[in-house]
Amino acid sequence: MTGDDSRDLKPDQDSRDSVDQSDETPSFRESLSAAARKAGIAKVQPGEAPSASALLAAIGGVRGLVESILPGLVFLVTYTVTAQLLPSVLIPIGVAAIFVVARLVARTPATSAVAGVIGIGVSAALALLTGNVNDNFVPGLIINAISLTVFVVSVLVRWPLVGLLVALLTGDVGEWRKDPAKLRVAYLASGLWIGLFALRLGVQGPLYLAEQTSALAATKLVMGVPLYAAVLWVTWLLVRTAYSRPRPESDNNVSEGDSNVRSK
């Protein structure tokens, strides 16, 4: 092999290296898809019949359910018994911290439990700083307001968020908006989530302003995981109708015609 030949091969090798490196780098769409798959909504795939076990998995399983509900229940019981700020906000933090320790000891993923401690800690810190036990609920109200805004904006710009999430999970990002059935279901399902967040704000906001702490804690429990699970269930029932339906005969005929032409 001559020196010129070796020089001619170098650009090819460099190009192959660059292709390999680009293949290893996840695209923006792949990153979004990975993030969507980590969400609870990804526990049931379109076309799969939602079952009780799938729904339970979507909200974190039995352990996730307990970790979500128990701190709020402890707050409600503690405040009802003591009517004191300090124990009402600190005891739930202790309960959430126990969940983290239990997961670490069992060597199971502790991300959700740590996130729970952080959320409860932020709420408790705000209440302690202001001296008002009702401010323990402000972060939750803010999260619901942001979520409501995001869903409403997604509908207004004609990219309903539920449709986008499902498209990321199924790899249908570029096509789902061209399918009237999928687009209609995406709008309807996104409307359900808008209703959920609006209902939470509509009920809990006035209770916060009226400083009805016990009623606010109780409604937050009821409108938390149970209502979330119900809306998630209905969402996937709707998505299933759009993603599991057979393709129209016209589409099939077009596909068969194209295949025949290519074969010829």
Image (tube, helix red, strand yellow):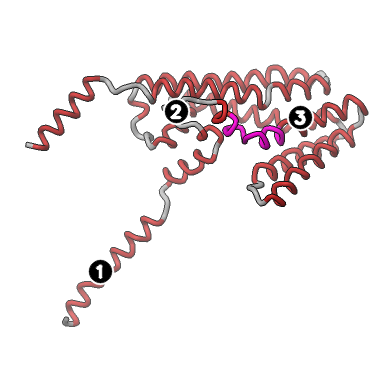
- The numbered dot on residue 11 is 1
Q: Secondary structure at mark 1?
A: helix
- Residue 251 in which image quadrant: top left
Quadrant location of the C terminus in the rendered image:
top left
- Residue 19 in which image quadrant: bottom left
Q: Who's the residue at 57% across and 26% down the image?
A: 52
Q: What predominant SS class does the magenta segment belong to?
A: helix
On screen, residue 8 versus residue 82, left or right, reads left
Q: Specify the amino acid type for callout 3.
A: Phe
Q: Residues within 10 Å of mark 2 (few under 14, many from 20)?
A: some
Q: Who's the residue at 33% across and 26% down the image?
A: 178
Upstream in the sequence, badge 2 or badge 1?
1
Identify the residue position indicated by label 3 in the image: 137
Q: Residue 216, position in %: x, y?
A: 78, 22
Q: Specify the amino acid type for callout 2.
A: Glu
Q: Tell which of 143 and 66 is nearer to you.
A: 66
As drawn, 148 above or below 6: above
Exactly how many numbered labels are in the figure?
A: 3
Stretch in magenta? 56-68
Q: Tell which of 247 and 158 is nearer to you.
A: 247
Q: Secondary structure at mark 2?
A: loop
Q: Residue 115, position in %: x, y?
A: 68, 42
Marks 3 and 1, how far apart in space? 61 Å
State which mark lies toward you, 2 or 3. 2
Identify the residue position indicated by label 2 in the image: 48
Q: Residue 31, position in %: x, y?
A: 46, 46
Q: Is residue 204 magenta?
A: no
Upstream in the sequence, badge 2 or badge 3?
2
Q: Who's the residue at 85% across and 39% down the image?
A: 90
State which mark lies toward you, 2 or 1. 2
